Amino acid sequence: MTDFVSADLYAQVQQFYARQMGLLDDGRPDEWAATFTEDAVFQEASRLNEPLRGRQTIRDSSRARKQRLADEKLDFRHWLGMLSVVPQEDGSLQTRAYALAMRVPRGGALDIFASVVMHDRLVRVDGTWQVRHRDLTHDGSGRDEQG
Amino acid sequence: MTDFVSADLYAQVQQFYARQMGLLDDGRPDEWAATFTEDAVFQEASRLNEPLRGRQTIRDSSRARKQRLADEKLDFRHWLGMLSVVPQEDGSLQTRAYALAMRVPRGGALDIFASVVMHDRLVRVDGTWQVRHRDLTHDGSGRDEQG
Amino acid sequence: MTDFVSADLYAQVQQFYARQMGLLDDGRPDEWAATFTEDAVFQEASRLNEPLRGRQTIRDSSRARKQRLADEKLDFRHWLGMLSVVPQEDGSLQTRAYALAMRVPRGGALDIFASVVMHDRLVRVDGTWQVRHRDLTHDGSGRDEQG
């Protein structure tokens, strides 16, 4: 059973995520939002939050987050790892990755506080990738992962 | 001194490990065991445990582990990173990677509790890779890493 | 906006860093120093340290560090992740990566104590890569990242 994608595709997706998470962590909400499709859905079902629906909602949420982090003087980092990529028949990609969320207050200690499993549907738009659907499952939430 | 493997091979091994560790973390012991050769040896010398010898032993160990984690309501994640791949003359691969082991109890906090150096010998079987030998060295154990 | 580098280049840089950080963590200061150019500059501006200037200074610093870790019986690991690679007009590479620094004392617990953003300038020398400039920014230091 060999279901590995090509090195080209794998490296593209790795770079997409390095860039995307960098935009979030660097506090660039508009560019972050532009990595999602106009009709993207961003859900954290394990948190019982309502999903964010649409790029504009994602941008607004990210702008509010940026302000909050600035107020709290927090550096934030998102790491992704253990990436799997499964091409779909319609040309989109189903990806799965582990994520770690961490923060450091000004002059304070590193706190790696969340381990999350991320499932994305990526679509190719204008020669790059965008997220059409993201589902985050927080470890410890008791929610079984989707298939 | 350029001893890098091709992007194709490197991406294959990255994907192999993402899939393999996902099977362990998702509690799929039979599929996990199938990523090892029939005669695989799995040792954690730094822990003074006897090595696990053979796929069946690895499967039994993993099934018992799954039951234990379910009883304790623990989510478990294994991250690999800093991967090196060195092709051997017989076509097998010697790999080295860092590993982090972490767990989250239901409703509890993330605990990243072990840093491990992993040395694997991978062999190609039926168009994919399998682990023929795995050696784990836990940091802090005082055991010098193998060469 | 597609500014991804080829899988070949991306995999090369990933392997370069896996090897380089392994040399540091394995306590091989001379080989570690050889991964920098003769005139390399290594700065941790967020720490207010003077930059290390030149391969010999980097080697001396790494030898002293090795002795210190041996005295303290510490295992040390450096993880890099979320790697971006941007080729420059002169053939060099500007890279950005996240780094985690962690240590385990003999018989003790894992301590992941620093999250760092690393900016490197890599140059090709004799068929491999070397670091000509490294800048580390520690999260929580209050220093804005460079552009």
Image (cartoon, coloured by chain):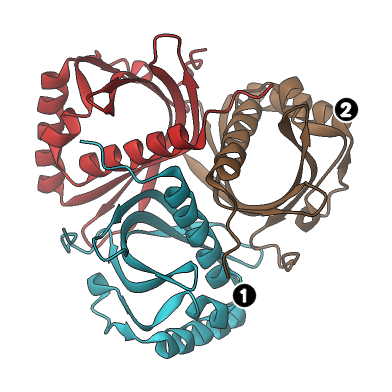
Chain colours: A red, B brown, C cyan
Say what amino acid the circle numbered 2 marks.
Gln
Residue B55 lies in quadrant: top right
Q: Identify the residue position indicated by label 1 in the image.
A: C73
Residue at the (35%, 15%) spot, across then down: A45
Q: Determine the secondary structure under disc 1.
A: loop
Q: Identify the residue position indicated by label 2 in the image.
A: B56
- Within-10-Å neighbours for mark 2: few <14, some 14–19, many 20+: some
Q: Determine the secondary structure under disc 2.
A: helix
**Which x, y percent locates residue B79?**
55, 42
Q: CA distance from mark 2 to mark 1?
A: 38 Å
To which chain does the residue with label 2 belong? B
Vertical relation: B101 (above or below) A115: below
Left of C18 or right of it: where is B38? right
Residue at the (38%, 18%) spot, across then down: A46
From the viewer's side, name the closer residue of B105 and A14: A14
Vertical relation: B124 (above or below) C127: above
From the viewer's side, name the closer residue of A109 and B22: B22
Residue at the (56%, 78%) spot, across then down: C31
Residue C25, visible in the rendered structure? yes
Q: Quadrant of the N terminus of chain B?
A: bottom right
To which chain does the residue with label 1 belong? C
Left of A118 or right of it: where is A107? left
Residue B108, visible in the rendered structure? no
**Which x, y percent locates residue A73?**
16, 52
From the viewer's side, name the closer residue of A130 and B135: A130
Residue C119 lies in quadrant: bottom left
**Which x, y percent locates residue A75?**
23, 51
- Within-10-Å neighbours for mark 1: few <14, some 14–19, many 20+: some
From the viewer's side, name the closer residue of C15 and B133: C15
Left of C122 or right of it: where is B112? right
